[in-house]
Amino acid sequence: MTQTAPGRLRRRLVNLRFAADATAVRAALITVDTILAQSDAPPDLRSRTQIALAEACNNIVEHAYRPKPDSREAQIMLDISGDAGGLQVTLRDRGRAMPDGPLPGRILPHIDPDTPATLPEGGFGWALLREMTRALSISRQNGQNILRFRLHMTDTPSPLGKSMP
């Protein structure tokens, strides 16, 4: 059985502009979750949205805007629209462009639970985004990075990536 979005989700839901820093990202995530809850989004969709947005926004903060530029310039623009099948998310920033080439893949860093001191601090973001979203794309237009993805109303992700040796 296919689940469709409640009527209150079928519209432009979010149009935010916020500073590219951890505090503003957290506030934006809270705002988005509040809007989705008021629009009757199912808890699973809300959770997946929070995880995907946190990863994407933190990637922008960590990579597009490091070292930190003039704070007036370090902005993230977020648009979310709902339709019968789920959410369409667009993030824009004016930070550094991603290196040319394909988007990073689904391969995860090696994890050895027997040696906690060697656990990686990063390397999970793109694999997570690829597994949790659909139609993931990034482009650069008029000095802006534009990241787009869909989150379906119901989605069962496949097992996450392979470990790198």
Image (cartoon, rainbow, N blue to C red):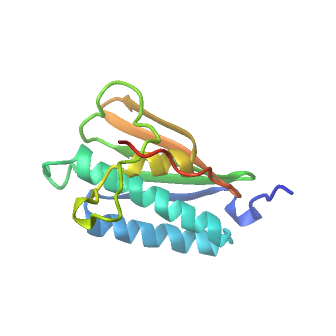
- Image x and y of residue 24, in percent: 31, 66
* Viewer-nearest residue: 76 or 162: 162
* Viewer-nearest residue: 150 or 144: 150
Quadrant of the image containing the C terminus: top left
* In the image: residue 118, left or right of residue 129: left
Please tell me how many numbered marks the rendered image carries.
0
* In the image: residue 20, left or right of residue 52: left
Does residue 104 lie above or below 158 as drawn?
above
Residue 15 visible in image: no
- Image x and y of residue 116, in percent: 27, 66
For residue 27, which quarter of the picture?
bottom left
- Residue found 50% across the figure and 42% down from its top: 148
- Residue found 36% across the figure and 24% down from its top: 101
For residue 146, which quarter of the picture?
top left
- Residue found 62% across the figure and 75% down from its top: 38
Residue 24 visible in image: yes
- Image x and y of residue 155, in percent: 68, 55
Does residue 46 lie above or below 111 as drawn?
below
Instruction: Name the outermost residue toward the top.
Output: 101
- Residue found 68% across the figure and 72% down from its top: 40
Quadrant of the image containing the N terminus: bottom right
Does residue 53 lie above or below 142 as drawn?
below
- Image x and y of residue 150, in percent: 59, 47
